[in-house]
Amino acid sequence: MKTIASLLLFAALASAQTTTFQLHGVASELVGTTNGSAVTPAIGPAGTLVVNGAGAVAFTPVAALPPGTAAASGVSFKSCCANTNNAFYKFTGAGLGSIFNAAEGQVVLYLTSPYTFAQLSTLTGFRYAFDVQDVQGSHQLGFVPQVTSGKLLFTYWTGGKTSAQYFVPAGTEDALFGAGVTIKVTLAWSGTSFSLSLNDKVVKTSAYSAPMYAWSSSSTFFVGAQSFGGAGYNSSDDSISELTVISGGGVPPPPPLPPPPPSNTVTCTQTFDSVMVTLACPSTTLFPHTLSLQVTMPALSAQAIQWQIDGNKPNIAGVGGN
């Protein structure tokens, strides 16, 4: 049996990634703590702090953030869950379209829970880490942790208005998202799928179709609350750190391959019977190339095989015979 294989190696370059929004979750991003105070993220458009009634914004030290991150704290809001006595960050307008790429992108954030799973199980309402709506009532992107039917559930959106859900395996809730525990959440979408990763491990992948966003002056991006009719509900008292939106990140088609080098392949005609194998190779193209042969002859020992090329005995390394 003779096998000839050709192997081509090439490197695929990842398409450019652009960070279009980054909120560290530190006090220096906020001018004041009263309603209407300006919020200036590290990257992206400015927003405002909304404070209703006795609501408040707070900053809590977060020790579990990875090295190299700018934040040493997370921002949280009091209190859940109505639109009275609560607070949140609000970004609005058609300019939100420059942040979110429907074709491919990611949202990355770190959440630190103030509750054990047992404590969270006794609380009511939702706690929205963020909520993006191009048209009011159309949840395009968002992330919400909650307890339902005694299970820790993460509900999330990455475009197309359809939510996906992931139930945390029973018995792992406190290790993953218990009191004082920081979890890294990554929502990623590209092509025909979107995924949820927790602490850099993909836990669920779903079908995806890029939506046609309709950004306008009424579009909203709430951090720490849900947008409902333009008002903020279900504020999050989880600490939110390093909320980052990334545009792009897929792999483009490889560049055109260079012209192939001159061929070193010699095509030989093979015939055999019980005592002899004959390979008829074009002598004008055989040398100075190396000829590699693999011949299976169960009826003959290696010492019984004679190798000849054009009637001459060649120097063939690594084979039996004479």
Image (cartoon, grey):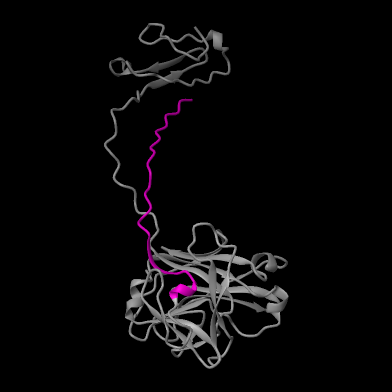
**In the picture shown, does residue 20 fall above or below 122?**
above
**Left or right, residue 68 beside residue 198:** left
Magenta region, residue range = 1-29
Residue 187, position as x, y percentages in the image? 49, 66
Residue 28, position as x, y percentages in the image? 45, 73
**In the picture shown, does residue 254 fall above or below 3?**
below
Can the viewer see residue 289 in this picture?
yes
Front-most of residues 36 and 12 = 36
Residue 71, position as x, y percentages in the image? 50, 66
Q: Main secondary structure of the magenta part?
A: loop
Front-most of residues 170 and 63 = 63
**What residue is drawn where x is 29% and y is 34%?**
260
Total numbered circles = 0
Residue 134, position as x, y percentages in the image? 39, 81
**Left or right, residue 121 beside residue 224:** right
Can the viewer see residue 149 in this picture?
no
Q: Is residue 254 magenta?
A: no
Front-most of residues 121 and 115 = 115
**In the picture shown, does residue 80 fall above or below 15?**
below
Front-most of residues 258 and 196 = 196
Quadrant hosting residue 293: top left
